[in-house]
Amino acid sequence: MGKQKILALDFDGCIVDSVMEALFVTYVSYRKYINNKTRIFDNKKPQIGKFLSLISDYQPQVKKFRQYRHHIKDASDYAVILYIVEDNLEVSSDNEFFKIKKLIPDKDMERFYHFVKREGQNISNIHVTLDSHHLLDISHPLFWKNSNGKNPNFFEIISVNDVKSGKWNPYHPSLIKRMINYVEELEKGGRYPLCIWPPHCLIGTEGSNVYPVLNEILQKWSKTKTNIINFVSKGSN
Protein backbone atom coordinates (compact mmCIF):
# COMPACT_ATOMS: atom_id res chain seq x y z
CA MET A 1 0.00 0.00 0.00
CA GLY A 2 1.31 3.45 -0.92
CA LYS A 3 1.64 6.33 1.48
CA GLN A 4 -1.60 7.84 2.70
CA LYS A 5 -1.92 11.49 3.56
CA ILE A 6 -4.47 13.05 5.85
CA LEU A 7 -5.18 16.72 5.32
CA ALA A 8 -6.38 18.78 8.28
CA LEU A 9 -7.46 22.38 7.83
CA ASP A 10 -8.52 24.89 10.47
CA PHE A 11 -10.46 27.98 9.48
CA ASP A 12 -11.17 31.16 11.36
CA GLY A 13 -13.12 33.58 9.20
CA CYS A 14 -11.46 36.65 10.64
CA ILE A 15 -7.97 36.62 12.12
CA VAL A 16 -7.69 39.58 14.46
CA ASP A 17 -5.10 40.80 16.90
CA SER A 18 -4.75 42.41 20.29
CA VAL A 19 -2.27 45.26 20.56
CA MET A 20 0.35 43.09 22.24
CA GLU A 21 -0.05 40.29 19.72
CA ALA A 22 0.09 42.56 16.68
CA LEU A 23 3.48 41.69 15.26
CA PHE A 24 3.30 38.06 16.35
CA VAL A 25 0.00 37.42 14.61
CA THR A 26 1.21 39.25 11.52
CA TYR A 27 4.40 37.22 11.47
CA VAL A 28 2.55 33.91 11.79
CA SER A 29 0.09 34.88 9.07
CA TYR A 30 2.90 35.90 6.74
CA ARG A 31 4.91 32.72 7.30
CA LYS A 32 1.88 30.44 7.13
CA TYR A 33 0.22 31.86 4.04
CA ILE A 34 2.98 33.54 2.06
CA ASN A 35 5.70 31.06 3.10
CA ASN A 36 8.45 33.64 3.15
CA LYS A 37 11.15 34.87 5.49
CA THR A 38 10.75 38.01 7.55
CA ARG A 39 13.44 40.44 8.61
CA ILE A 40 11.67 41.79 11.70
CA PHE A 41 12.36 38.71 13.82
CA ASP A 42 15.51 37.66 11.94
CA ASN A 43 13.48 34.75 10.60
CA LYS A 44 13.08 33.31 14.12
CA LYS A 45 9.66 32.40 15.43
CA PRO A 46 8.93 34.52 18.52
CA GLN A 47 7.55 32.85 21.62
CA ILE A 48 3.82 33.35 22.05
CA GLY A 49 4.19 34.19 25.74
CA LYS A 50 6.62 37.06 25.21
CA PHE A 51 4.34 39.73 23.78
CA LEU A 52 5.50 42.42 26.23
CA SER A 53 9.16 41.94 25.35
CA LEU A 54 8.26 42.01 21.65
CA ILE A 55 6.53 45.34 22.09
CA SER A 56 9.60 46.69 23.89
CA ASP A 57 12.10 45.34 21.35
CA TYR A 58 10.20 46.38 18.24
CA GLN A 59 8.62 49.73 19.12
CA PRO A 60 8.99 51.35 15.65
CA GLN A 61 7.49 48.33 13.91
CA VAL A 62 4.62 48.07 16.37
CA LYS A 63 3.87 51.78 15.96
CA LYS A 64 3.73 51.39 12.20
CA PHE A 65 1.61 48.26 12.45
CA ARG A 66 -0.94 50.13 14.55
CA GLN A 67 -0.91 52.92 11.98
CA TYR A 68 -2.17 50.59 9.25
CA ARG A 69 -4.20 48.10 11.28
CA HIS A 70 -7.51 49.69 10.24
CA HIS A 71 -6.91 48.41 6.69
CA ILE A 72 -7.27 44.78 7.81
CA LYS A 73 -10.24 43.09 6.17
CA ASP A 74 -9.05 39.47 5.99
CA ALA A 75 -6.15 37.24 6.97
CA SER A 76 -4.00 38.05 3.94
CA ASP A 77 -3.97 41.73 4.91
CA TYR A 78 -1.64 40.90 7.79
CA ALA A 79 0.99 39.90 5.26
CA VAL A 80 0.48 43.20 3.44
CA ILE A 81 1.11 45.17 6.63
CA LEU A 82 4.26 43.17 7.35
CA TYR A 83 5.43 43.95 3.83
CA ILE A 84 4.76 47.66 4.47
CA VAL A 85 6.54 47.58 7.83
CA GLU A 86 9.60 45.70 6.61
CA ASP A 87 10.07 47.90 3.54
CA ASN A 88 9.25 51.09 5.48
CA LEU A 89 6.60 52.13 2.98
CA GLU A 90 4.01 54.86 3.50
CA VAL A 91 0.32 54.31 2.74
CA SER A 92 -2.24 57.11 2.93
CA SER A 93 -5.40 55.49 1.56
CA ASP A 94 -7.25 52.20 1.06
CA ASN A 95 -6.47 52.42 -2.65
CA GLU A 96 -2.73 52.58 -1.99
CA PHE A 97 -3.02 49.67 0.44
CA PHE A 98 -4.87 47.63 -2.20
CA LYS A 99 -2.20 48.40 -4.82
CA ILE A 100 0.48 47.03 -2.51
CA LYS A 101 -1.69 44.01 -1.75
CA LYS A 102 -1.86 43.20 -5.46
CA LEU A 103 1.95 43.00 -5.51
CA ILE A 104 1.89 40.15 -2.97
CA PRO A 105 0.52 36.80 -4.16
CA ASP A 106 -2.56 35.90 -2.13
CA LYS A 107 -1.45 32.36 -1.47
CA ASP A 108 -3.38 31.41 1.63
CA MET A 109 -6.31 29.54 0.06
CA GLU A 110 -4.60 29.28 -3.31
CA ARG A 111 -1.81 27.13 -1.87
CA PHE A 112 -4.29 24.78 -0.21
CA TYR A 113 -6.27 24.58 -3.46
CA HIS A 114 -3.25 23.54 -5.51
CA PHE A 115 -2.07 21.15 -2.81
CA VAL A 116 -5.36 19.24 -2.84
CA LYS A 117 -5.44 19.32 -6.62
CA ARG A 118 -1.90 17.98 -6.84
CA GLU A 119 -1.96 15.46 -3.98
CA GLY A 120 -5.65 14.51 -3.99
CA GLN A 121 -5.10 10.90 -5.04
CA ASN A 122 -2.68 10.38 -2.14
CA ILE A 123 -4.95 11.92 0.50
CA SER A 124 -6.98 9.29 2.33
CA ASN A 125 -9.03 11.58 4.58
CA ILE A 126 -9.73 15.29 4.91
CA HIS A 127 -10.74 16.92 8.19
CA VAL A 128 -11.86 20.55 8.18
CA THR A 129 -12.57 22.38 11.44
CA LEU A 130 -14.83 25.39 11.16
CA ASP A 131 -15.00 28.11 13.79
CA SER A 132 -18.72 28.72 14.34
CA HIS A 133 -19.58 31.35 16.92
CA HIS A 134 -22.77 32.87 18.28
CA LEU A 135 -22.92 36.65 18.47
CA LEU A 136 -23.31 36.11 22.23
CA ASP A 137 -19.91 34.44 22.60
CA ILE A 138 -17.55 34.72 25.57
CA SER A 139 -14.95 36.36 23.33
CA HIS A 140 -17.37 38.91 21.82
CA PRO A 141 -18.29 42.29 23.38
CA LEU A 142 -22.00 41.49 23.81
CA PHE A 143 -21.18 38.80 26.40
CA TRP A 144 -19.66 41.30 28.87
CA LYS A 145 -20.61 44.62 30.45
CA ASN A 146 -19.26 46.90 33.17
CA SER A 147 -21.15 48.57 36.03
CA ASN A 148 -22.36 51.25 33.60
CA GLY A 149 -23.77 48.66 31.22
CA LYS A 150 -21.06 49.33 28.63
CA ASN A 151 -19.63 46.48 26.56
CA PRO A 152 -15.84 46.11 26.31
CA ASN A 153 -13.93 47.45 23.33
CA PHE A 154 -12.37 45.17 20.75
CA PHE A 155 -9.06 43.68 21.95
CA GLU A 156 -9.87 44.33 25.62
CA ILE A 157 -8.09 41.80 27.85
CA ILE A 158 -10.28 40.46 30.68
CA SER A 159 -8.42 38.90 33.63
CA VAL A 160 -9.77 36.73 36.41
CA ASN A 161 -9.34 39.70 38.77
CA ASP A 162 -11.49 41.80 36.42
CA VAL A 163 -14.30 39.25 36.78
CA LYS A 164 -13.89 38.80 40.54
CA SER A 165 -13.85 42.57 41.16
CA GLY A 166 -16.87 43.19 38.96
CA LYS A 167 -14.95 45.35 36.50
CA TRP A 168 -16.43 43.11 33.81
CA ASN A 169 -19.52 40.96 34.33
CA PRO A 170 -21.13 38.35 32.08
CA TYR A 171 -24.50 39.32 30.64
CA HIS A 172 -26.27 37.13 33.23
CA PRO A 173 -25.27 37.05 36.94
CA SER A 174 -25.72 33.27 37.10
CA LEU A 175 -22.64 32.90 34.89
CA ILE A 176 -20.18 34.71 37.18
CA LYS A 177 -18.84 31.62 38.97
CA ARG A 178 -18.47 29.73 35.70
CA MET A 179 -16.65 32.67 34.09
CA ILE A 180 -14.23 32.96 37.00
CA ASN A 181 -13.36 29.28 36.59
CA TYR A 182 -13.04 29.67 32.82
CA VAL A 183 -10.69 32.65 32.94
CA GLU A 184 -8.67 31.06 35.76
CA GLU A 185 -8.09 27.98 33.63
CA LEU A 186 -6.98 30.14 30.71
CA GLU A 187 -4.46 31.96 32.87
CA LYS A 188 -3.20 28.75 34.46
CA GLY A 189 -2.61 27.31 31.02
CA GLY A 190 -0.36 30.25 30.20
CA ARG A 191 -1.11 30.18 26.48
CA TYR A 192 -3.24 33.27 26.07
CA PRO A 193 -5.57 35.53 28.07
CA LEU A 194 -9.26 36.12 27.41
CA CYS A 195 -9.27 38.72 24.64
CA ILE A 196 -12.41 40.34 23.25
CA TRP A 197 -12.50 40.02 19.47
CA PRO A 198 -14.71 41.65 16.87
CA PRO A 199 -17.64 39.27 16.19
CA HIS A 200 -16.37 36.72 13.69
CA CYS A 201 -17.28 33.34 12.17
CA LEU A 202 -20.91 33.98 13.07
CA ILE A 203 -23.13 30.94 12.51
CA GLY A 204 -25.13 31.31 9.31
CA THR A 205 -22.85 33.93 7.78
CA GLU A 206 -20.18 33.75 5.09
CA GLY A 207 -17.47 34.00 7.74
CA SER A 208 -18.27 30.53 9.10
CA ASN A 209 -18.01 28.85 5.69
CA VAL A 210 -15.07 27.37 3.83
CA TYR A 211 -13.46 29.76 1.35
CA PRO A 212 -15.32 29.17 -1.98
CA VAL A 213 -12.26 28.36 -4.11
CA LEU A 214 -10.99 25.83 -1.59
CA ASN A 215 -14.44 24.35 -1.05
CA GLU A 216 -14.66 23.74 -4.79
CA ILE A 217 -11.56 21.53 -4.84
CA LEU A 218 -12.58 19.78 -1.61
CA GLN A 219 -15.92 18.81 -3.13
CA LYS A 220 -14.16 17.57 -6.27
CA TRP A 221 -11.91 15.44 -4.08
CA SER A 222 -14.95 14.00 -2.29
CA LYS A 223 -16.57 13.11 -5.62
CA THR A 224 -13.42 11.60 -7.12
CA LYS A 225 -12.50 9.57 -4.02
CA THR A 226 -16.13 8.73 -3.13
CA ASN A 227 -15.30 9.77 0.39
CA ILE A 228 -16.88 12.07 2.97
CA ILE A 229 -15.04 15.15 4.19
CA ASN A 230 -15.13 15.42 7.98
CA PHE A 231 -16.35 18.96 8.62
CA VAL A 232 -16.11 19.70 12.35
CA SER A 233 -17.92 22.75 13.67
CA LYS A 234 -16.41 24.18 16.86
CA GLY A 235 -16.72 27.22 19.06
CA SER A 236 -20.50 27.36 19.46
CA ASN A 237 -20.73 26.05 23.03
Image (tube, rainbow, N blue to C red):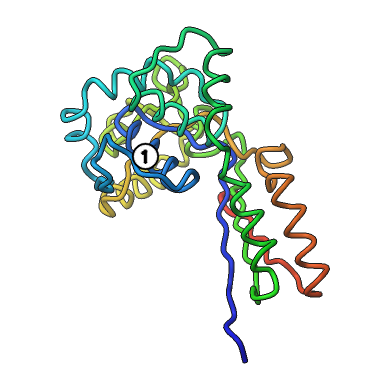
Q: Residue at 69% x, 51% y: name it.
A: 214
Q: Is residue 5 left or right of residue 17?
A: right
Residue 128 sits in quarter: bottom right
The front one of 99 and 180 is 99
Does dot 1 land on a helix, a strand or a loop?
Answer: helix
- Measured as percent of width and height from the top left, residue 220 is found at 80, 62
> Front-most of 224 and 203?
224
Residue 158 visible: no
Who's the residue at 21% across and 41% down the image? 50
Instruction: For the N terminus, give its image quadrant.
Output: bottom right
**Quarter location, residue 23:** top left
Residue projecting furthest to the bottom: 1
Q: Which residue is mark 1?
A: 27
Q: Position of residue 119 (x, y in %)?
A: 64, 68
Q: Is residue 119 above or below residue 206?
A: below
Q: Is residue 161 left or right of residue 153?
A: left
Q: Can residue 172 be seen in this snapshot?
A: yes
Which of the two residues, 117 or 154, is positioned nearer the viewer here? Answer: 117
Q: Position of residue 24 (x, y in %)?
A: 33, 38
